């Protein structure tokens, strides 16, 4: 999916449903990210708006309440969570009503119970599967119980292991903290098995969102290339990377094919602004006043322009068009300067 494959007046043109990630897009911890609420309120006036989250710690109802407190109009069924995707996967692997070992918080327990499973926290209860998701209260003892239950590889008769997501990090109000991927990795190190991942970047969570909203032309907004943008790409959905969360300009420049967004935004106000045309002449790419040229191994800034986001857009397109990896270039530091808001 090329960044500039289609010209649009604004990123929202022709879009009927906007699907937004939460952490790093709408909020970081309990507080809203600057400009996010006002921008999404503007979306609400003209389009359906839903939320997709890999965070398994909370229920869809608690997420909806949080978003409502921040000023948005959100019902629980407008929140699609990775525990919901995990339960759909689990339903095809173990009998209905089975006992499953849950590593995680209220959000995962709630979805397991709604799906009709019995929840245990102990490997001694002979669970039919292990489902693991992030929660701040997850402790070593929880990871140990998962490891005890997963001693036997699945292809040798062991039970299934589903992870709600594999995000290495999670944005918080105080900064970037370890995510569920680090906890899943701890269990993997102990047992030598790999979990099946239900959430982004896998497609089931996107497919559920599209079906639930009846979307014909959805647009997904995320802050991570490896989960949000890669997942949208796999699901065939146009995507926005907003630089208010995890990934930074240097990550955009290095994005591999399959993890490149349709649009790059500094913040969500730009959803409602005309998206600039990209002009290509030989090895030079220009976005408004920003111009970048590729000269062999050198990336050369010809003009920075008036807006830092345009320089990122021009630099990314110039590098991506070569088909070469970022480590094959000498990139000026100014190209990946980072004046954009982040937690």
Image (tube, helix red, strand yellow):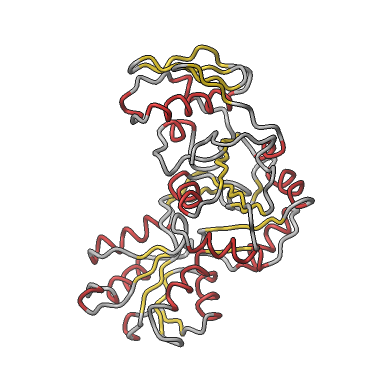
**Left or right of residue 325, residue 216 in this image:** right
Residue 321: quadrant of the picture: top left
- The residue at 71%/61% (across/down) is 74
**Left or right of residue 194, residue 219 in this image:** right
- Residue 104 horizontal/vertical position (percent): 46, 68
Q: Residue furthest right?
A: 45
- Residue 315 horizontal/vertical position (percent): 48, 24
- The residue at 57%/58% (across/down) is 52
Figure check: 149 above or below 324: below
Q: Nearer the viewer, residue 59 or 223?
A: 223
- The residue at 24%/66% (across/down) is 191
Q: Residue furthest left?
A: 156
Q: Say whether residue 343 is visible.
A: no
**Left or right of residue 341, residue 36 in this image:** right
> Can you say which quadrant of the picture contains the C terminus?
top right
Count of marks overlaid on the render? 0
Figure check: 262 above or below 200: above
Figure check: 28 above or below 310: below
Q: Residue furthest top?
A: 302
Q: Say whether residue 55 is visible.
A: yes
- Residue 120 horizontal/vertical position (percent): 42, 81
- Residue 11 horizontal/vertical position (percent): 65, 40
Q: Nearer the viewer, residue 11 or 335?
A: 11
- The residue at 41%/85% (across/down) is 99
Residue 131: quadrant of the picture: bottom left
């Amino acid at each position: 999916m090329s960044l500039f494959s289609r010209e649009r007046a604004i990123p929202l043109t022709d879009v009927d449903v906007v699907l937004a990630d939460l952490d790093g897009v709408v909020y970081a911890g309990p507080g809203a990210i600057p400009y996010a609420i006002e921008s999404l309120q503007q979306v609400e006036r003209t389009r359906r708006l839903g939320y997709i989250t890999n965070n398994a710690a909370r229920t869809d109802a608690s997420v909806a309440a949080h978003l409502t407190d921040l000023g948005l109009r959100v019902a629980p069924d407008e929140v699609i969570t990775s525990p919901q995707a995990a339960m759909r996967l689990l339903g095809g692997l173990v009998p209905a009503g089975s006992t499953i070992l849950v590593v995680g918080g209220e959000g995962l327990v709630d979805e397991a119970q709604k799906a009709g499973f019995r929840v245990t926290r102990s490997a001694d209860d002979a669970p039919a599967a292990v489902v693991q998701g992030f929660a701040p209260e997850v402790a070593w003892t929880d990871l140990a119980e998962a490891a005890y239950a997963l001693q036997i590889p699945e292809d040798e008769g062991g039970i299934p292991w589903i992870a709600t997501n594999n995000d290495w990090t999670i944005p918080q109000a105080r900064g970037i903290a370890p995510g569920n991927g680090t906890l899943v990795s701890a269990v993997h190190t102990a047992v030598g098995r790999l979990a099946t991942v239900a959430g982004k970047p896998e497609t089931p969570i996107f497919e559920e969102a599209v079906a639930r909203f009846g979307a014909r032309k959805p647009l997904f907004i995320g802050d991570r290339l490896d989960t949000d943008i890669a997942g949208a790409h796999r699901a065939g959905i146009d995507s926005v990377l907003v630089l208010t969360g995890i990934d930074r300009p240097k990550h955009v420049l290095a994005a591999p094919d399959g993890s490149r967004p349709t649009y790059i935004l500094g913040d969500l106000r730009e959803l409602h602004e005309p998206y600039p045309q990209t002009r290509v002449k030989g090895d030079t790419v220009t976005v408004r006043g920003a111009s970048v040229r590729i000269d062999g191994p050198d990336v050369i800034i010809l003009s920075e322009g008036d807006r830092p986001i345009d320089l990122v857009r021009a630099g990314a397109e110039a590098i991506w068009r070569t088909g070469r990896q970022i480590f094959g270039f000498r990139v000026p530091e100014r190209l990946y300067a980072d004046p954009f808001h982040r937690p």
